[in-house]
Amino acid sequence: MGLHGALKRARSSFSKKIRNLISKRDPDLLNDIEDILIQADLGLRSVERLIDALEKVEPTDYYSELQKELINFLNKHISKTIDGNPPFVELYVGVNGVGKTTTIGKRGYILEKEGNKVIFASADTYRTGAVEQLRHWGKRIGADVVESHYGADPASVAFDAVDAAIARGMDYLLIDTAGRLHTKMNLMEEMKKIKRVLSKKREDLPHETILVVDANIGKNTIQQARNFNDTVGITGIDIAKLDGTAKGGIVITIVEELGIPIRFLGIGEDVKDLIPFKAKDFVHALFE
Ligand SMILES: Nc1nc2c(ncn2[C@@H]2O[C@H](COP(=O)(O)OP(=O)(O)OP(=O)(O)O)[C@@H](O)[C@H]2O)c(=O)[nH]1
Ligand SMILES: [Mg+2]
């Protein structure tokens, strides 16, 4: 469906409304645009900055000015490409059901297409069916899965997976973890342990700690992200389920509130439905 298709609902609840207001020469135009931005889950700081920018131009230029401002802002927080020594390790964390395992499968596909050797690890030893789900993705893209038994220590799976990745000369190791509520302290501690064990194994590991969030959760995502970031330090955010959401503004709010770059956008359940986040593409898809 592509990014443009995925943002169809967001577009009609957001940019279409703004365009209508502008063309109707709404007398209270700036106030009404402000309301629409807030409803679209944009944070207050973003809204204020956008309205300030609009105040400096003519109403006929509002639409293009909004896009320009958003692109400039999002481009200030772009994820860096990692360098160093393989295997590059990406640890995926997040609340239950947001799309971690699926994102790993799709990310593996991208990496393999780029010519990398990829291995998965299932450090979700908690949810029934979690390993099978990751194995299914592994089969789909031809990647092995390091796994253990139900109830095993997730940190030890991560530890063994690094050994396996090194022994097999892998370029990337993607580690799946169990979904956890950011308010459950014991589960947050367990995640810290996974990170600790990885960095003991080799001090540059993991290269990335990716928080996966669900685009439909809206503003609660910010608190989730804060807690995860405070506990384990998040290096990038992947936003799943952007297809069908009417609230694309959350993408902007995440960057605004946390300053953490967005890496990938999930736009469906198929292996090809993960696309790198690019400010210009995103804003154009939201507006045009
Ligand atoms: N439409 C859509 N569905 C998605 C996307 N990403 C994941 N899903 C679906 O969301 C559901 C949950 O995805 P999972 O990958 O199992 O989520 P998870 O975070 O690993 O879940 P737990 O391991 O139980 O915490 C599945 O039905 C996925 O197919 C996406 O980008 N778009
Ligand atoms: Mg999972």
Image: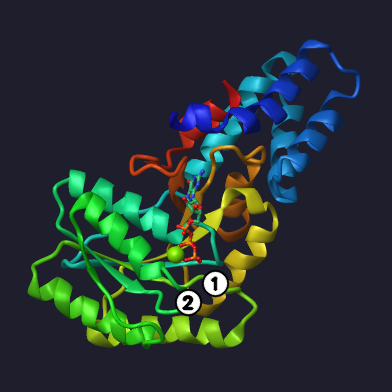
Q: Do the numbered discs 1 and 2 sit on residues whose CB atoms are within 8 Å? A: yes
Residue 217: x and y, percent? Answer: 65, 54
Residue at screen point 44% across, 60% down: 100
The residue to which callout 1 is attached is 228
Q: Amino acid at mark 2?
A: Val
The residue to which callout 2 is attached is 232
**Separation (CA) of disc 1 from disc 2:** 6 Å
Residue 47: x and y, percent? Answer: 73, 42
Q: Indicate the quadrant of ligand 2 in the picture.
A: bottom left
Which SS class for mark 2? Answer: helix
Whether residue 244 is visible here, answered yes or no, is: yes
The circle on residue 187 is: none
Is 281 situated above or below 233?
Answer: above
Q: Report whether 20 appears left or right of 204.
A: right
Is 141 situated above or below 9?
Answer: below
Q: How is the image coloured?
A: rainbow
Which SS class for mark 1? Answer: helix
Residue 286 vs residue 154, the one in the foreground = 154
Residue at screen point 22% across, 82% down: 160
Residue 84 vs residue 271, the one in the foreground = 271
Q: Report whether 100 appears left or right of 20.
A: left
Residue at screen point 72% across, 18% down: 19
Q: Quarter holding the C terminus? A: top right
Which residue is at the far right?
27
